[in-house]
Amino acid sequence: MRNLFKIAIRNLLRYKRRTLMTASLITIGVVFVLGYIAIAGSFKNMMVAQITDSSLGHLQVHRKGYMAAVESLPLNMNLKPRPYKILEDTLKSQPEVEAYSPRIRFGGMFSNFVETTSIRLNGVYPEQEFKTTPLLPSRIIKGERHLNRGEILVPELLSMGMGVKPGDAVVIVTTNKDGSVNGKQFKVSGILESAQGPGGRDGYITFEDAMEVLRMEEVEVSEVAIRIKDFSKETAFTKKLEGLLGKELNQKGKPIFDVHPWEKLSPFYNIAQMIDVMSIFVKVMLVAIVLISIMNVMIMAVYERVREIGTIAAIGTYPGKILSMFVIEGFSLGVLGVIIGNIIGLSIIFVLNFSGITFDFGRQTGLILRATIAPLDVVIISGIVILISVLASLQPAWKASRMEPIKALRHV
């Protein structure tokens, strides 16, 4: 085998220009794929972080059936004190959980004493909410980055339309689940930039104020947003939590809770999926580049060395060794392209990160590009290239190993 490698490398060096061209094509393909995956992965992670860390949380728990009617924000589908206590105890016992925030969501009317419009409100415990969605304070573009009793964070669109600013007094009027109407005056503490685009109409008040305006006598929760310590384990933790909460049944023997990861709560998940699809497409392009490059080189190598193949076959070289020799040439080309491509690709990623390139995403400005690629991705890409290099060599190598020595020696 060692001698076969020597012969293969010697043959590659005999045609230096062709070898260099083929290795360059493979290198360019590897560099392109590594760069794309690193940058696209960075953009995807940033996009997901902006969504989950500013409003949604990594996953949410609702009462069974709540999400089917979420557009109407039904107060009669809230979690009652007992189920919420079960959920809270479960979350406190899970080491994966970093923070959680109970919310009560409801619709109401917003008035500045001159005009009135509709608004969606989130009643939260500010300290828990800011831990669960740590980017929420950064969305407050005017006013103070806190929320106290009697204060409200007003969405930017509503603020512009109604002409309200921090410090103004406003009134929230809402209908509780029994049908009675109640109102409460609030002070605007800040203007909140939307996390879902310019159409966002979600404001924030404290949980205590929400209970007061809804005339609640006991704590009821519309949803519980959860933040876990390691976001990469979100899917595994979602399944774990579903298993734990699935054991809790109501009086009719049906599950009480629904667990929803962020993917089921945001339309931006479709964009994230598109990025993954594009990554697969780019990998397919790399496979095509390697396949065509290696196959072209090996076919030419067989065609130009017909008499040489006939000679080594005539002196008793087994067909298997002839096949191995050409396959090793393809393998060597793949390894060479992978090594150079990985060095250049990882160097480019390092330079991009060192340069501190900034870009804008939606209404978020000055975001720093953090191009990263997992070692596993590098290994997978390298393995694909080498595997395709070997496979592309098989047909020409098979043809070479099956040549009749006499016919090959007569070849001109």
Image: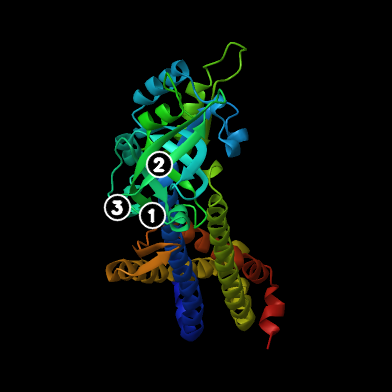
The kind of residue on which mark 1 rests is Pro
Callout count: 3
Q: Can residue 379 be seen in this snapshot?
A: no
Within 10 Å of the Cα at label 2, are there few (<14), some (14-19), or many (20+) other Cα atoms?
Answer: many
Q: In 3D space, how far apart are the residues under numbered discs 1 and 3 (Cα atoms)?
A: 44 Å
Which residue occupies the extreme front position in the image? 114
Q: Which mark is residue 288?
A: none
Of tags 2 and 1, the one toward the viewer is 2
Q: Residue visible at 52% across and 59% down?
A: 384
Q: Which mark is residue 143?
A: 3
Which structural element holds mark 3?
Answer: strand
304 in relation to 342, above or below: below
11 in relation to 258, above or below: below
The kind of residue on which mark 3 rests is Gly
Of tags 1 and 3, the one toward the viewer is 3
Which residue occupies the extreme top position in the image? 251
Determine whether, in the image, residue 257 is placed left or right of residue 403: left
Determine whether, in the image, residue 110 is placed left or right of residue 412: left
In this view of the protein, which residue sits in the foreground, 108 or 403? 108
